[in-house]
Image (tube, helix red, strand yellow):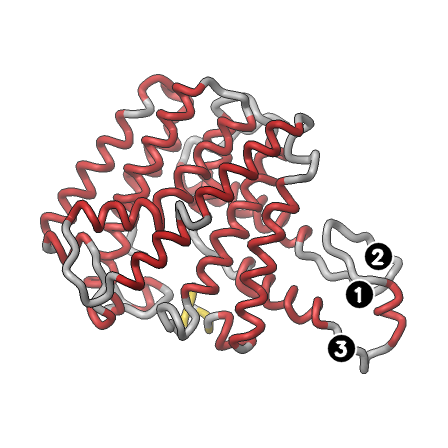
Amino acid sequence: MVIKLPDNLQEAIKAVSTSLDERMGELLYVPTNADEKTTVISLSPKIKAIGSNHVRGEETVLEAMRYSTLSGGKRLRPFLTLCSAGLFGVSWDAAIEAAAAIEFIHTYSLIHDDLPAMDNDDLRRGKPSCHKAFGEAAAILAGDGLLTYAFQVLSSNKVHADTAVRCELISALAQASGCWGMVGGQMMDLEAENKQLSVEEIIRLQRLKTGELFAVSCEAGAILGKAPGMMRNLLRAYAHDMGLAFQITDDLLDVEGTRTQMGKTARKDKIKGKATLVAAMGVERAREHAKILTNQAVSHLAVFDKKADNLRALAEFVIARKG
């Protein structure tokens, strides 16, 4: 099935979110008996036959993985993947597999980010954080499980028949989410608490912590479509600018928003002494910078004509949102 999203942004996001949640639910499915249909994850029939007193650690960690993964969220990264894949004639089924893998990575990062050793947040998406619902050990393992499972999903030929394409996707996602990307940015974020960073240093921190996963989400569709390097670079440039505008808006919401709007603790950045562009520039300058970044992001899409209208609308949406 060729990717065709509604022209209305909210309807398009909803269509992606519905399909994504259905597929992630299948991928994280826990069968209750040996005769049921299984997907990628399944439990050993021998273990099931032992009885209810047997310790089933895999069921516990899967429950925690499902709890955090299927608890809602904006699903912007998967949306980027579906939109970019649609530019190059990629099938919906292939793109949704890649999108699920990326969302598994994103969810793992949120689980770990909420832990007491990191940002220590008890609330995520309006619900108790994973470690509050399941305990710290289960939360750590749920994050580990999602991280590793993402690459198992990408290795499947459901993603692409060409093994070279699958390897390229795995490599790109590993780099974006590892020490040269999201993990490196998260470490910088922790080390920067209560320190004075320059605007350039904060931008680099945010590009690693947030921007690289946005960039690979956009590039994934182009990789699936074997797009030319120039078009891939344009999509990465769009995603970097849009991602930084998204992060600035997140930081503005932390200053101006409420716990109800955000689904997580407000005023957290100031309390923890986080290095943000809002702190460095002030509210109004940061808001203006987000608008400049949005315009810049949209300018990278000119070559794609009307086919990229949902990406243009998304760039405007991320700075206008209230939660």
Query: SS for tag 3?
Result: loop
Q: Residue at x 57, y 26 (%)?
A: 90
Which quadrant: the C terminus? bottom left
Quarter occupied by the N terminus:
top right
Q: Nearer the viewer, mark 3 or mark 1?
A: 3
- The reply to whether callout 2 and callout 1 are in contact (CB within 8 Å) is yes
Q: Which mark is residue 55?
A: 3
Q: Which residue is mark 2?
A: 36
Residue 317: quarter of image: top left
Q: Is residue 13 above or below residue 62?
A: above
> Mark 2 to mark 3: distance in Å?
21 Å
Circle on res. 2: none
- What type is the residue that disc 1 sits on? Thr
The answer to whether 210 is drawn above or below residue 215 in the figure is: below
Residue ranking furthest to the bottom:
53
Please name the amino acid that badge 3 sits on: Val
Instruction: Check whether the beta carbons of the residues at disc 3 and disc 1 lie within 8 A of each other.
Output: no
User: For the residues marked 3 and 1, what is the alpha-carbon distance in whole angstroms?
Assistant: 15 Å
Q: Nearer the viewer, mark 2 or mark 3?
A: 3
Residue 296, horizontal then vertical, whole percent: 23, 31
Q: Which mark is residue 32?
A: 1
Crowding around mark 2 (Cα neighbors within 10 Å: few <14, some 14 to 19, many 20+) is few
Instruction: Label 2, secondary structure: give it.
Output: loop
User: Identity of the amino acid at label 2?
Assistant: Glu
Q: Mark 3 vs mark 1: which is more N-terminal?
A: 1
Q: Nearer the viewer, residue 153 or 14?
A: 153
Query: For residue 116, which quarter of the picture?
Result: bottom left
Q: Residue at x 46, y 71 (%)?
A: 129
Question: 90 or 105: nearer the eye?
Answer: 105
Tag 3 or tag 2, which sits nearer the N-term?
2
State the residue in front, 297 or 162: 162
